[in-house]
């Protein structure tokens, strides 16, 4: 392959510099679309910014400089290269260039490029050396680095610590936070009430300068802690994550601080009740909570409620024998796997009936039942009400009218 032609071509497309390095980090060649173009970083200086504790990245990494220009590190089997600086649309920025006999800072004559175009060029180089090409998602596996932002955070951290000490300001105690989290993890409703009501010295940290954004950020932090605590307590991960998503959307859409506070407090209790219900079912069961095969099995069911789920399909996904999985589920849960699947579908149907405008036939089709009457038969057996009766009794009227 003509590596030189490839790198020169990409350099011209992006109107920038491309540096080529050996796998050991030695600069071998430099390509540029314009002889007068210079960069604020030297060859090894920019290279070392991408090498963290001497570990070479194994996939492309994007980085922003102090001028807010973008650089990209691209590893290949034969060499490494660094692309940049690249200007992105909506960035009216200066980079260092030089004319004959001059060494001054001027506006770059090149036009900015679209972010997606930059990503396409990165993948062009990266994929030419791979047996199996990857898509744009690979660019976000490695965390994007921002040199300017990192320095800004350190500076702000130093100033904040000084101000907090001067003002004798303290955060709310860690042990109080842990009592809330452990109450959720153990499904302890009364303990959660006591922990939230505790009177303590300290205050919530500043998460944003805007008061509304502050309470929303706090809510998202609390939601994250609560959802992970519930999962540790045995909640099905997919259900916990879905509940997180539901509350997050409501919080972001809310315009009232009191409403946001009410939402994240309600979420904490809902997670605690989720764990308590799970543990109450487990008390009479001969096998301990948390069998990894059962957890994965439930997670699969939760993620595929809109499909026709069979024991065989679950066993195949979990790489287990279907008979073994069926027997294990019965021993651990005191019910058959088929009964569990049907019960979860009925619970989802209840949610649709309460909060959506979907017709009975649409709900049945979504949940993988062959017909409305097929779902209705199992619904009546499980809930002791018809779907119509259930919606009339519990449906949110403003939603379904």
Image (cartoon, rainbow, N blue to C red):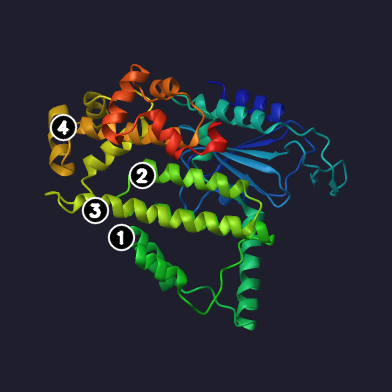
Q: Is residue 154 above or below residue 130?
A: below
Q: Position of residue 360 (x, y in %)?
A: 43, 23
Residue position marked by numbered label 2 in the rendering = 237
Residue 74 placement: quadrant: top right
Q: Position of residue 284 (x, y in %)?
A: 15, 51
Q: Earlier in the sequence, mark 3 or mark 1?
A: 1
Residue position marked by numbered label 4 in the rendering = 326
Q: Can the viewer see residue 178 in this picture?
A: no
Residue position marked by numbered label 1 in the rendering = 186
Q: Nearer the viewer, residue 30 or 282?
A: 282
Local crowd at mark 1 within 10 Å, few (<14), some, or many (≥20)? many
User: Disc 4 versus disc 2: distance between alpha carbons?
Assistant: 21 Å
User: Disc 3 versus disc 4: distance between alpha carbons?
Assistant: 22 Å
Q: Is residue 245 above or below residue 34?
A: below
User: Disc 3 versus disc 2: distance between alpha carbons?
Assistant: 18 Å
Q: SS for tag 1?
A: loop
Q: Residue at point 84% right, 49% down?
A: 103
Q: Is residue 299 above or below residue 128?
A: below
Proximity of marks 3 and 4: CB atoms separated by less than 8 Å: no
Q: SS for tag 4?
A: helix
Q: Residue at point 38% right, 68% down?
A: 179
Q: Position of residue 204 (x, y in %)?
A: 56, 69
Of all residues, the one furthest to the top in this rendering is 370
């Amino acid at each position: 392959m003509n590596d030189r032609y490839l790198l020169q071509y990409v350099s011209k497309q992006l109107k920038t510099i491309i540096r080529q390095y050996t796998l050991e980090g030695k600069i071998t060649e430099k390509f540029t679309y314009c002889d007068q173009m210079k960069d604020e970083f030297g060859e090894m200086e920019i290279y070392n910014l991408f090498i963290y504790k001497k570990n070479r990245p194994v996939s492309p990494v994007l980085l922003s400089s102090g001028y807010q220009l973008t650089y990209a590190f691209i590893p290949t089997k034969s060499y490494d290269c660094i692309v940049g600086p690249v200007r992105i649309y909506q960035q009216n920025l200066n980079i260092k260039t030089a004319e004959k006999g001059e060494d001054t800072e001027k506006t770059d004559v090149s036009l900015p490029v679209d972010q997606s175009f930059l990503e396409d060029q990165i993948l062009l180089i990266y994929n030419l050396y791979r047996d199996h090409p990857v898509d744009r998602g690979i660019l976000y596996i490695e965390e994007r680095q921002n040199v300017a932002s990192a320095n800004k955070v350190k500076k702000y951290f130093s100033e904040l610590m000084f101000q907090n000490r001067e003002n004798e300001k303290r955060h709310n105690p860690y042990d109080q936070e842990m009592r809330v989290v452990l109450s959720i993890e153990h499904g302890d409703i009364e303990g959660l009430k006591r922990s939230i009501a505790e009177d303590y010295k300290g205050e919530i940290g500043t998460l944003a300068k805007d008061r509304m954004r502050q309470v929303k950020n706090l809510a998202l932090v609390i939601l994250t802690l609560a959802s992970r605590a519930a999962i540790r307590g045995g909640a099905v991960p997919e259900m916990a994550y879905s509940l997180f998503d539901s509350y997050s959307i409501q919080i972001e859409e809310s315009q009232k601080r009191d409403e946001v506070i009410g939402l994240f407090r309600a979420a904490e209790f809902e997670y605690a009740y989720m764990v308590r219900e799970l543990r109450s079912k487990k008390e009479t069961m001969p096998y301990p909570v948390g069998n990894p095969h059962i957890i994965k099995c439930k997670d699969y069911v939760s993620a595929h409620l809109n499909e026709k789920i069979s024991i065989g399909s679950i066993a195949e996904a979990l790489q287990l024998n279907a008979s073994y999985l069926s027997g294990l589920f019965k021993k651990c849960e005191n019910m058959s796997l088929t009964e569990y699947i049907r019960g979860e579908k009925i619970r989802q149907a209840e949610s649709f009936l309460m909060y959506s405008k979907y017709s009975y036939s649409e709900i049945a089709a979504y949940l993988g039942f062959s017909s409305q009457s097929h779902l209705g038969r199992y619904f009546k057996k499980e809930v002791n009400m018809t779907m119509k009766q259930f919606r009339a009794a519990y449906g949110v009227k403003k939603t379904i009218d």
